[in-house]
Amino acid sequence: MFHLPLHGRVPRRCLYRHFQFRTASTGIKLALFQPDIARNVGAIIRLTACFGVPLSIIRPTSFTLDDRSMKRASLDYGPLAHLSVHENWDKFQSERPPGRLILFTTRGATPLDEFRFQDGDTLLFGSETAGVPDTVHNEADARVVIPIREETRSLNLAISAGIALWEAIRK
């Protein structure tokens, strides 16, 4: 098991080696279904670049992939990201590598801390405003929820993706 010390600094290369090995060995992937907010996508591009995880974007989106705010949010990590764009849900399904499709949703059946990830899982997140349609819900192999307080509606998409990705890699 890998532990971060509570005091002092860990050389960045040590952390990188651990995560590079761990993410490459799990085959975890991340997918966004018709995202609405370019800045969220930019932050998720940065997230997946940092962890070495492939990202799929399923169109249509409400912005172009050269959107200025998306580029600003992803900083200079875009070239480090492994990004694929799919014209629609059917294309994504036909081009997706083997593995389970894990849908993160506020209507999830299994709390994140109880879910058992497997190598090759694709973590799927719906659009910020509409989530995913019932057809996508029905095609998912599992539906997972990140527990939050009852008086709140949802987390930001990029924050949810970061929490879920870390948990999938950690386990």
Image (cartoon, rainbow, N blue to C red):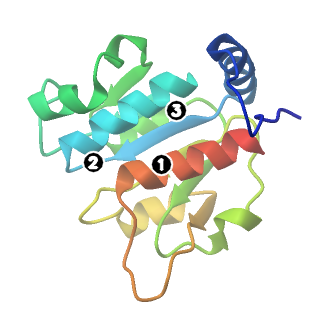
In this rendering, position of residue 144 left or right of residue 90: right
Q: Amino acid at mark 3?
A: Arg
- In the rendered image of this protein, does residue 81 appear above or below residue 60? above
How many tags in the picture? 3
Q: Amino acid at mark 2?
A: Gln
Q: Earlier in the sequence, mark 2 or mark 1?
A: 2
**Residue 161, numbered label:** 1
Looking at this view, name the residue that lies furthest to the front: 7
- In the rendered image of this protein, does residue 106 appear above or below residue 93? below
Q: Name the residue tied to disc 2.
A: 34
Q: Residue at x 38, y 24 (%)?
A: 84
Q: Name the residue tied to disc 3.
A: 96
Observer-side mark, 2 or 1, equals 1
Q: Under tag 2, what secondary structure?
A: loop
Q: Nearer the viewer, residue 171 or 15?
A: 15
Kindly indicate whether the residue at mark 1 contacts the one at mark 3 (C-beta within 8 angstroms). no
Image quadrant holding the N terminus, namely top right
Q: Nearer the viewer, residue 71 or 140?
A: 71
Observer-side mark, 3 or 2, equals 2
* Image coordinates for residue 100, horizontal then vertical, percent: 65, 46
* Image coordinates for residue 126, horizontal then vertical, percent: 37, 56
